[in-house]
Image (cartoon, helix red, strand yellow):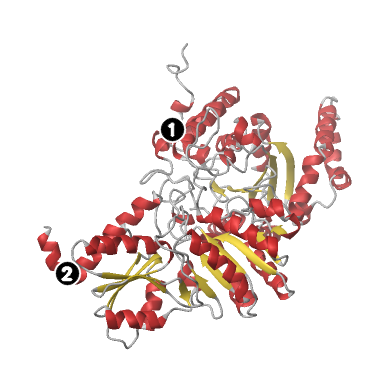
Amino acid sequence: MDRSTEQRLLDSINSPADLRRLNQKQLPVLAKEIRERILETTAQNGGHLASNLGVVELTLALHYVFDTPADRLIWDVGHQCYAHKLLTGRQQQFSTLRCPGGLSGFCRREESAYDCFTTGHSSNSISLALGMAAARDAQGGQEHIVAVIGDGALTGGMAMEALDQAGDLQANLIVVLNDNGMSIGGNVGAMSSYLSRFRANPAYDALKRRVKNFFSHIPLLGQPLINIFSTVKNSLKSALVPGMLFEDLGFVYLGPIDGHDLHELIDILDGAREVGKPTLVHVKTVKGKGYAPAERSPEIFHGLGRFDAASGIPLNDDCKGSYTEIMGDALVRLASVDPDIVAITAAMTHGTGLDRFKERFPERFYDVAIAEQHAVSFAAGLASHGKKPLVAIYSTFLQRAYDQIIIDVCLQNLPVVFAVDRAGLVGCDGYSHQGLFDLAYLRSVPKLTVMAPADGREFRVMLAEAFAYGKPVAIRYPKCHAGELPGLPRPLEYGRSVQLKDGGDLAFIAIGSMVQPALKAAELLEREGIRARVVNARFIAPLDKEALLRAVRECRGRLISVEENVISGGFGAACAEALSGVSAELVMAALPSEFQPQGRRGDQLAALGLNGPGLAALAVRRWFPERRAEHA
């Protein structure tokens, strides 16, 4: 029969209840169909491919064993939830994954009752699950609470804190450790080395199976002998797998087991349901399972744009000419002449553009795993002893290290450079990953210099100057192609803006990614006989107050601040503070103080009025209403 006309098992699954009506022999067929659907959709829409292909069998087993949504299932990070979405009534909408108005690429409470928590950042699932378990026990509930956490997320300190309390409370909680040896890139650190002992030494698990199988075939004495064996298995486990961390923390440890063996998964998870106290199920999986390009290069296929499914070749290169690529290349050049420059990432080597630095200067490169707080304090320690660290972290993830930025770096006035990637709107990753707040949470920190480049050439200059300043510096830049502004690059004077276009009817005071739209708006206004000045602010802290006052005097007091950040506490607010007591009309063009959904960055900026036409229209509405009437 033609496969295209054959009824697929997946078509009959509208909820986990439908899944549980299948027999176990049908599940491998369903797993294959799910992989095909994930590959097809991700190739078209982009997304997190390798992580999702690796948990297909695990997802099937979890929904097969547990009574979801009554039983609660929390996915750490949530970027591995595609199979979960397909099994929980969303396969008809699955083609809209990561599209504007479509399914989120992460778990989202508003989307389904099966998404019991909105996710996006890592290492918090055990904390969430433990809180749910404590509330359940206080209310006399009986539901099972399951947290699925990757070995990469387990490197985050928050996960270890939650394990510690869970062992102390002895609540009925199941933690499934999805161990594929990866976070986004290969895992690093002592926890990764500890888990590798399990992967490298299967002797314990194999011996346990053989002994139990042997005893079970002895008439009458079989079960008593199995019971005796269970009383000594901890000694056996300690001998073959030293330092049983999880059991020492108060967890019952089950595993490691093959995360692609559905029968074994179902059997072990079924047993875990009956334990009644903290239980950790250690599952070994292969990231990118079933798709050769992703298995070979799981880091590249962790998160990507559209690609050709047959070959795995990207259909567009989002990194070429991006700020991220420019940062990586410029850093290598600077480090080649300054041996004190070092680079730090929190498990995001590829995403932050540090691949070349790692390859060129491996002894000066540090991947601290998913531990942003530690990354910042580690950088402070390096800086206190003469090194010049650069910490490259996405804006949305740097939020996690706010206290360390304030106390460990800025209070000490240490020369740490923060490369704040993905600032502003980031597109299809949506709510949890938008870098909307960094200007607001950074500009108020004393002693911290905050800059934003308007193009790639300016970014290179800022990065070089940041190391020369000898003080804490943050450079924020968006996820997009950098481009080049017309004209020659202007010298960078500390704390000073630069005027790019003269005009006396109003002034756009723009920062970073919004300089180019401001120039476009001035061009459009000029066609209407309106002369708009454009000032590239360059610095948020310190702010060039003199340029603001000059624009007030020379542009009829009409100013529009433009930023790709929330309006509350951002660049416009800084301008308003600087102009306090000055007679001026300041209009703030910024992102609304709301969480922004997924979408194409350009489309979203246009919808929010933060492109050339939108800014021009804003000026006309405010000060030239007669021009609107002319074009009505």
Number of marks in the rendered image:
2
Which SS class for mark 2?
loop
**Where is residue 515 drawn, in percent x and y?**
38, 64
Answer few, some or many: residues within 10 Å of disc 2's Cα (few below 14, many 20 plus, some between 14 and 19).
few
Q: Is residue 371 visible in the rendered structure shown here? A: no
The mark lying in front, picked from 2 and 1, is: 2
- Residue at image x 54%, y 34%? 313
- Residue at image x 54%, y 67%? 462
* Upstream in sequence: badge 2 or badge 1: 1
553 up-or-down from 169: above or below: below
Which SS class for mark 1?
loop
Quarter-of-image position of residue 593 = bottom left
Judging by the rendered image, the residue that carries numbered circle 1 is 14
Pointer 2 and pointer 1: residues touching (CB < 8 Å)?
no
235 up-or-down from 54: above or below: below
- Residue at image x 71%, y 72%? 381
**Where is residue 102 drawn, in percent x and y?**
38, 43
Q: Pick whichever, 384 or 441, lies toward us.
A: 384
Answer few, some or many: residues within 10 Å of disc 1's Cα (few below 14, many 20 plus, some between 14 and 19).
some
User: What separation in Å lies between label 2 and label 1 (alpha carbons)?
Assistant: 56 Å
Q: Quadrant of the C terminus?
A: bottom left
Judging by the rendered image, the residue that carries numbered circle 2 is 624
**Where is residue 285 drawn, in percent x and y?**
67, 38
Left or right: 117, with 276 as reference point:
left
In the image, what residue type sits under mark 2? Phe
Q: What label does residue 560 carry, if any? A: none
- Residue at image x 44%, y 55%? 483
Work out which residue is located at the far bottom of the displayed protein and give it. 581
Q: Is residue 81 visible in the rendered structure shown here? A: yes
In the image, what residue type sits under mark 1? Asn
